[in-house]
Amino acid sequence: MRLLKSLKDVFISSLPLLAIIILVSIVFPFQTGEEYLRVYLGYVFVIVGQAFFLLGVDHSIIPMGKEVGGSIHKIKRLAFVLIFGFLFGLVATVVEPALLVFVDQVTNINPNVISLLFIGLVGVGTGVFVALSLLRIIKNINLKWLFFAFYAVTFLLVFLVPNKYVAIAFDASGLTTGDISVPFILALGLGSATTLSKSKTNEESFGIVGLSSIGSIMALLIYFVFIKDNVPFLNTTVVETTMPSFGQIALDKLLEVFLGITPILVLFFVFQFVYIKLPLFRIKRLLVATVVVIVGLYIFLVGCDYGFIEAGNHIGKSFTDPLQPEWLKQLLYPICFVLCFAVTLCEPAVTVLGEQVETLTNGFLKKMTIKFTLAIGIGISGIFTIVNIFWVNEWAFVVLLVPLYVIALVLMIFTPKLFVALAFDSGGVSGGAITSAFLVPLVIGCASNLYLGNPEQIALKSFGNAAFVSITPIIAIEVLSLFFHASEKYRAKLKEHQEQDYQYLKQIATQFKPPKVALELEHE
């Protein structure tokens, strides 16, 4: 029964995505029956896989993360706690399959980039900032000041790096956490906050994902400052979208899931043996639920790559076909918004984040509120991605990205502490497997038509997608926080002055608050 409920919930969330797939396949029909099979079978796999994943994650990965986080205080020396954080961030990053694929794309366009050094720097940067996150929890350091300081340094580095490498550095930050590591890290933060933090507040539970993303960006920017820049973007393998067979995808994803789960299981069992010491029956339950998670994630990832790469590339090429009217290209803006909005609702990590937030806030923040807010944010990122593709300017990416981060940092000043950590964590959570499987091929399809005969420009436009996906959800959550903060403030004021100024306050609420909140106030 629980599986059926999970399937129902996932299917309802995926209906906007299904509508887009059907609409596009009608307006721009696929060439062969095999292409239809790939897309629709991929959709079924994604639904079934996500249902199994969400069914098991609450009883496997999340409890493991909480147990490990809750046991960190037993490591008596601060130095050892920080070493643990560093090693976990390092290992979880260097085995992340998405990062391994990404570095292959980077070395294809510039042989001066050393693969192992690239991966190692991303891992070290992430590890250092995971350790910093634990130190922040222990010392109760203000998260806002950390974000201000480190992003200030990051954007100083941006202007020292050759422009064409900036998008690569920001893209890498979105690839350091996978669908298994994200739930574990979120639970790790919760467990750590309950034992290490002096304040013991929910605000301390978030922030690890957001901070660790900065580490990978800074590490690569420093690397690109010193790299030789005498090799142009000439190799076009990065922009060739080939459709691998089902067997090849199934084999690749088996390795991907294995690499993703191994560091977490090793870490948990080390802590289990030394500190946690759960009874055997609890271990058996965790392992059974973990098998369900692995099976679900495997089916989900196979469905993403088997079906959605085909669909994304088809959409991109269809709307930018030189034989089509010019106005058709402009439809990519709303199409990409709706597409990114729809795929976000299907991302497992986004669902897990929403459930964690709803639990920690005792239902004050609903799961669907978080999911829809992130979906709007990532929908807007799709628009920025299309602007970046169409804008023929080598500085287009930087000109678009820097103001977005400035807006996020300014809004952070007015954002409550809980929402700051949640917002920046959501930036690292949102760019999941479905987003990558749809958006990257769509961008490559568009660029290959728009810049035909210019492989350097095609390669340049193929990076930067994950960067926009990482920043717009941050802004969306911060804007959401301002509405909720205003709602709380007006509720408190209403109770304080209810008898003497009730009508006046109701008028203020009606004018300045969302309709739902105003309606609630009328009934109080």
Image (spheres, rainbow, N blue to C red):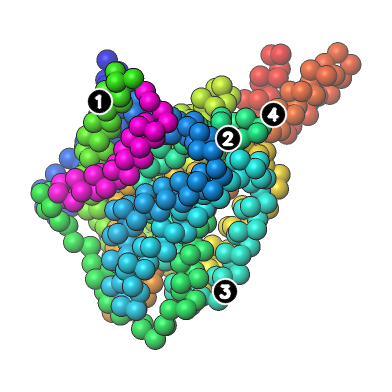
Say which mark, if any, is on residue 91: none
Indicate whether 103 appears above or below 337: below
Q: Residues within 10 Å of mark 3 (few under 14, many from 20)?
A: few
Point out residue 289 in the picture as x, y percentages from the top left corner.
28, 26
Question: In the rendered image, which residue does mark 2 sit on?
Answer: 196
In the rendered structure, the answer to whether residue 432 lies left or right of residue 254 reads right
Q: Nearer the viewer, residue 253 or 441?
A: 253
- Foreground mark, 2 or 4, reads 2
Name which residue type carries label 2: Leu
Left or right: where does residue 140 sit relative to residue 326? right
Mark 2: which secondary structure? Answer: helix
Circles 1 and 4: CB atoms closer than 8 Å: no
Question: Which residue is found at the position 29% from the left and 20% from the top?
Answer: 280
Residue 138 relative to residue 494: left or right? left
- At a point 32% along the width and 52% down the height, the residue shown is 96
Q: What residue range appears in magenta?
A: 249-278
Three-letter residue code for mark 3 = Phe
The verdict on residue 259 being magenta is yes
Could you tell which of marks 3 and 2 lies nearer the N-terminus? 3
How far apart are labels 1 and 3 at the CA level?
Answer: 50 Å
Q: Amino acid at mark 1?
A: Val
Per the model, the C-alpha gap separating discs 4 and 3 is 40 Å
The residue singled out by tag 3 in the image is 159
Residue holding disc 4? 487
